[in-house]
Amino acid sequence: MPWRSKEASSPASANPPPEAPQSPGSRGTMADKLKDTNTLGFLEAAVKISHTSPDIPAEVQMSVKEHVMRHTRLQRQTTEPASSTRHTSFKRHLPRQMHVSSVDYGNELPPAAEQPTSIGRIKPELYKQKSVDGDDAKSEATKSCGKINFSLRYDYESETLIVRILKAFDLPAKDFCGSSDPYVKIYLLPDRKCKLQTRVHRKTLNPTFDENFHFPVPYEELADRKLHLSVFDFDRFSRHDMIGEVILDNLFEASDLSRETSIWKDIQYATSESVDLGEIMFSLCYLPTAGRLTLTVIKCRNLKAMDITGYSDPYVKVSLLCDGRRLKKKKTTIKKNTLNPVYNEAIIFDIPPENMDQVSLLISVMDYDRVGHNEIIGVCRVGINAEGLGRDHWNEMLAYPRKPIAHWHSLVEWQGRAASFDSESSCPSLKPPPTP
């Protein structure tokens, strides 16, 4: 009936009847259709056009989605991008051992950077350089702190040595502002009572002084005098800083002082003014056949004053050392109230020739004190292991046996403890030669 068809068609369009359960045969037919390439392409296009199209059943849409996603995953797994050289190197290392550090994070350098480097390797040349630099540490105290220019001239009529301080160059900066306020102190050693100094030049590392200083001294005494220049940095509110010093041992080094002679000297590093302790003259003589070493103490000069009176009571103590231990000690007489004593006393030690390379002599100039301990004015050392003149004097004695060899030796401060040689000891290898 017409009205029945209208009535049936309207609810059907609004609420479609539930689908009848499909038979297994119909499901298999649908799966076969999905496997067909043409059908799959049509369905994909349909899905892309509208995922909610009412023309395609919901079950078919879900099946198509799952199949498309599965197909895409297979493509991703089977498709591999073109491998670069860094990936090739990674694959080459991968079969050997899987390390965390070998994983490619995409930050590796090109293969040229994969060559072994020298990082972490020991370089012997660096250590050799350090050993060479170790010698520079020894000469730290002798490093230069700029240069100073001065001139010397002797006036024979007035018997005066004229010292002219000209200028200094390339001084180190002692102030925070990167500059210094330098001035110079002048001594004519061994006399430290007569101290002269230049004016202070503000904020400069290259001062020009151009000042003259006069030291009355007989011409005959010039050979025994030394010129000492100390360069300081002036400080208004604290102690003045010492920049360095220059000691001219030989005043006739450049000329005979008859005319003015300009001299350039390096300023040697120093933190305090060096004190002149004086000098001692002694001779050495060795007789190999008798195994007898004779040290003759001749005299001392310009010793440091140790008493309130401005003098000292000096005597000389000579210690025979073997491997750092004192075997014997002998002394001279005491000279009262003098800084220039004369002794001419011989001190003898019996040492066989085979032991001469094992021993050394420590010469100590002492100040006698009636009350309290005797004080050390200065020391010097001679022997095969001594330094400088002490070694040269010893070698000269061995080179010229049976002949007295005399030299002046400068005294230096005793760095050790006086008690270290107070106890007597014996050296088994040091035996006197048999008497004929």
Image (cartoon, rainbow, N blue to C red):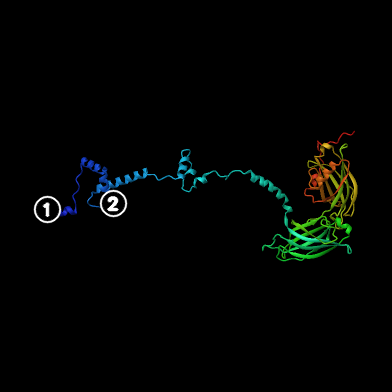
Q: Position of residue 329 (x, y in %)?
A: 85, 43
Q: Position of residue 263 (x, y in %)?
A: 79, 59
Q: Residue under circle 2? A: 48
Residue 212 figure quarter: bottom right
Looking at this view, is 251 or 9 the one in front? Answer: 251
Q: Position of residue 50 (x, y in %)?
A: 26, 53
Q: Residue under circle 1? A: 5
Q: Is residue 397 visible?
A: yes
Marks 1 and 2, how far apart at CA: 36 Å
In front of the other: label 1 or label 2?
2
Which comes before the other along the chain, label 1 or label 2?
Answer: 1
Disc 2, SS: helix
Q: Residues within 10 Å of mark 1 (few under 14, many from 20)?
A: few
Q: Residue 56, labelled with which disc?
A: none
Residue type indicated by callout 2: Lys
Q: From the viewer's perspective, tell me whether residue 55 is left or right of residue 298.
A: left
In the image as oriented, which residue stretches furthest toward the left? 1
Residue type indicated by callout 1: Ser
Q: Quadrant of the C terminus?
A: top right
Residue drawn at x 32%, y 44% as measured from the top left = 71
Q: From the viewer's perspective, tell me whether residue 176 is left or right of residue 92.
A: right
Looking at this view, is 410 or 87 the one in front? Answer: 87
Disc 1, SS: helix
Residue drawn at x 32%, y 46% as measured from the top left = 69
Residue 288 figure quarter: top right
Q: Position of residue 227 (x, y in %)?
A: 81, 58
